[in-house]
Image (cartoon, rainbow, N blue to C red):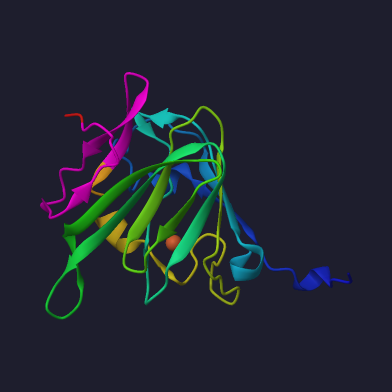
């Protein structure tokens, strides 16, 4: 196979501690320089994400979380490790805009290597690493390498609603050595929830 390496796009980006502080349960907690690593291949090669293990003030290391712009679903395969996926749909105003602090449906799904999870188009999603090793996934979301910063912030993803609410409706935290959930007080309502058997702590 002949490849002109001059045309190889920038596929790799790490998510910095500084950026993650926008959405951590404790923005002042001590974390690693990079929380996770992204290698974007798009639909053809898939996108690989690798999470560091560990907690920041009790919250497991997680991806920032985003909503998709337009009708776009994706499927994650868990390749290695153990995690909890959070999916949340926001309520919509009459003009169709999402209401940042009103959740219509929230789901927490514990996952491990060998499993796949489907993220429906309207569901914001993130994954937390609850294991003692890296968590590694492959997903099939499209990447347009003509975007301004496709590896770190692909154009199909909206991060602003998550930033505004400092994370999702629950944080995934360690409690007595096990995964549990802790409510994010900034959210006003959660209409429907399925917490995947995880306990909620105060
Ligand atoms: Fe996504």
Task: Note whether 176 is above or below 44 in the view shown.
Answer: above
- The quadrant in which the N terminus is found is bottom right
Is residue 156 within the magenta segment? no
Q: Is residue 7 left or right of residue 199?
A: right
Residue 37, percent from left and from top: 57, 48
- Image x and y of residue 149, in percent: 54, 67
The quadrant of the image that shows the C terminus is top left
Question: Which residue is depicted at the point 15% across and 43% down?
Answer: 185
Q: Residue furthest right?
A: 2
Which span is picked out in magenta? 171-200
> Of 17 and 44, which appears nearest the observer?
44
Residue 55 seen in the current view: yes
**Residue 94 falls left or right of residue 7:** left
Q: Residue sitting at 63 percent across and 64 percent down?
A: 41
Based on the picture, tell me whether residue 196 belongs to the magenta stretch.
Answer: yes
The front one of 110 and 52 is: 110
Q: Is residue 30 visible?
A: no
């Amino acid at each position: 196979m002949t490849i002109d390496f001059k045309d190889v796009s920038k596929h790799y980006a790490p998510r910095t501690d500084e950026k993650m502080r926008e959405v951590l349960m404790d923005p002042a907690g001590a974390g690693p320089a990079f929380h996770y690593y992204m290698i974007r291949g798009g639909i053809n090669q898939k996108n690989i994400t690798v999470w560091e293990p560990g907690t920041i003030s009790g919250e497991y290391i997680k991806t920032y979380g985003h909503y998709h712009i337009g009708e776009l679903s994706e499927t994650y395969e868990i390749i290695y490790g153990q995690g909890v996926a959070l999916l949340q749909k926001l309520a919509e105003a009459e003009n169709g805009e999402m209401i940042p602090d009103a959740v219509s449906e929230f789901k927490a799904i514990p996952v491990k290597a060998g499993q796949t999870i489907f993220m429906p188009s309207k569901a914001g999603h993130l994954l937390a690493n609850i294991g003692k090793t890296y968590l590694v996934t492959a997903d099939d979301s499209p990447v347009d390498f003509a975007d301004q910063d496709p590896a770190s912030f692909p154009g199909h993803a909206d991060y602003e609603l998550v930033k505004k609410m400092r994370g999702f409706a629950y944080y995934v935290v360690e409690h007595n050595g096990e995964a549990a959930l802790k409510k994010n007080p900034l959210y006003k309502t959660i209409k429907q929830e399925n917490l995947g058997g995880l306990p909620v702590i105060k």
